Image (tube, rainbow, N blue to C red):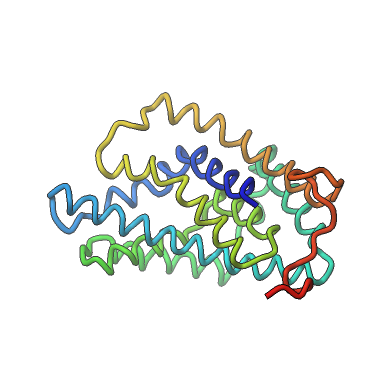
Amino acid sequence: MNGWMATALVLGMAGSAHCVGMCGPIALAVPSPSNSPSGRWLGTLLINGGRLTTYALLGAAIGVLGLGMQLAGLGRVLSIAGGVLLLLGVIVPGQLERWWPTGRLALGIGRLRGVLARNLKRTAPEALFLTGVLNGLLPCGLVYAALLGAATLASPGDGALFMAAFGLGTWPALVALRMGSGLLGSGARAWLRKVSPALISAMAVLLILRGLELGIPFVSPGPMVPHIAAGCP
């Protein structure tokens, strides 16, 4: 399991360039409680803490779904299908855009963005935390990739930890951006953009191998029995 948590952490770090582009403008638009260094740090930690909380809750929810599919005998299907979808997202991203949600789901996303926009100028601690929570709910392909990995763990606890590790991986770049550090220069961002598809592809292959249950330790173990089915507390 530690290997999967490390994978989630590295995925978040490698996707930092994407996160700076997607979440960076929101992070920069939110004012700090004060202009002092402590005020800026407080605002930064609250925003990123809220986003991390959302990721962990999403991981727990997707872990319940994965557990249900595992108990129904569909765990292998979930893992292989998730890996295939991730590969398609890297190879033919334009084609997958046709599956973008419409109707009520798209309307809900639009309302979410509206609520986030109205909350951006508030500087109370609870408002900053809420901004981070709402930010974590915005559509993001990288988050979807991480959620697919969390689902295959078939455990709400492990799913939450996986997504928390993924979120922590994005922290250095976003914290540095908000605090005004030049830690992530243009060269580093360009390198991360190149690495991110390769890492997502590697995760996709791992998910497919995991679903095939080839008996390879740590990579493609044999059939896994969920904790509940095994009678563990």
- Judged left or right of residue 210, residue 54 is left
Q: Is residue 219 positioned above or below 71 on the image?
A: above
Residue 93: which quarter of the image?
top right
Q: Residue at x 79, y 64 (%)?
A: 225
Q: Position of residue 77 (x, y in %)?
A: 81, 58
Rendered residue at 24%/51% (across/down): 41
Image position of 203 with respect to 151: above or below: above
Quadrant hosting residue 123: bottom left
Residues 225 and 73: in front is 225
The residue positioned 34% from the left and 62% from the top of the image is 131
Image-based side of 17 in relation to 155, left or right: left
Residue 173: percent from left, percent from top:
38, 40
Q: Nearer the viewer, residue 40 or 118?
A: 40
Residue most extreme to the front: 232
- Residue drawn at 56 percent across, 36 percent down: 196
Query: Looking at the picture, does residue 118 appear above or below residue 94?
Result: below
Whether residue 71 is situated above or below residue 143 in the rendered picture: below
Q: Quadrant of the C terminus?
A: bottom right
**How many badges with numbers are in the image?**
0
Between 85 and 183, which is closer to the camera in this rendering? Answer: 183
How far from the left and from the top, in percent, is residue 215? 85, 47
Residue 104 placement (x, y as % from top left)? 56, 72
